């Protein structure tokens, strides 16, 4: 399964986490980012798949 692209907010968050004194190691921060983007991609696919079954027909 692929990941969604990095957003500006995600880049900002990763930068802050890496540069700031944090209690989590870099591997944890990066793994969390991959997990988050993978979950977002699953949600995006599910959202569009669910909507694809609803055929909207307009009648005038």
Image (cartoon, grey):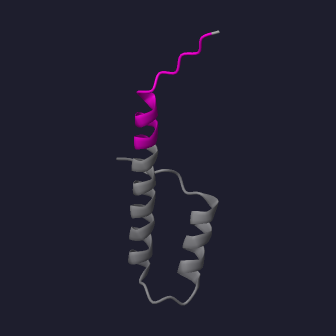
Number of dots carrying numbers: 0
**Vertical placement of 46 versus 14: above or below?**
above
Which residue sits at x=41%, y=69%?
32
Furthest-front residue in view? 60
In depth, the one of 13 and 53 nearer the eye is: 53
**Vertical placement of 7 versus 58: above or below?**
below
Locate residue 13 relative to residue 37 in the image: left or right. Answer: right
In depth, the one of 60 and 40 nearer the eye is: 60
Which x, y percent locates residue 23? 45, 90
Which x, y percent locates residue 52? 44, 29
**Vertical placement of 12 versus 51: above or below?**
below
- Picture quadrant where residue 21 is located: bottom right
Which residue sits at x=55%, y=57%?
6
Q: Indicate whether residue 58 is drawn in magenta.
A: yes
Furthest-top residue in view? 60
Placement of the C terminus among the 4 image quadrants: top right
In depth, the one of 54 and 18 nearer the eye is: 54
Locate residue 9 relative to residue 49 in the image: left or right. Answer: right
**What's the magenta region?**
45-59
Q: Indicate whether residue 10 is drawn in magenta.
A: no
Which residue sits at x=43%, y=70%?
30
């Amino acid at each position: 399964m692929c990941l969604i692209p990095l957003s500006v907010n995600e880049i900002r968050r990763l930068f802050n986490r890496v540069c700031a004194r944090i209690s989590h190691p870099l591997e944890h921060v990066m793994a969390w980012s991959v997990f988050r983007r993978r979950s977002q991609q699953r949600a995006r696919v599910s959202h569009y798949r669910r909507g694809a079954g609803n055929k909207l027909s307009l009648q005038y």
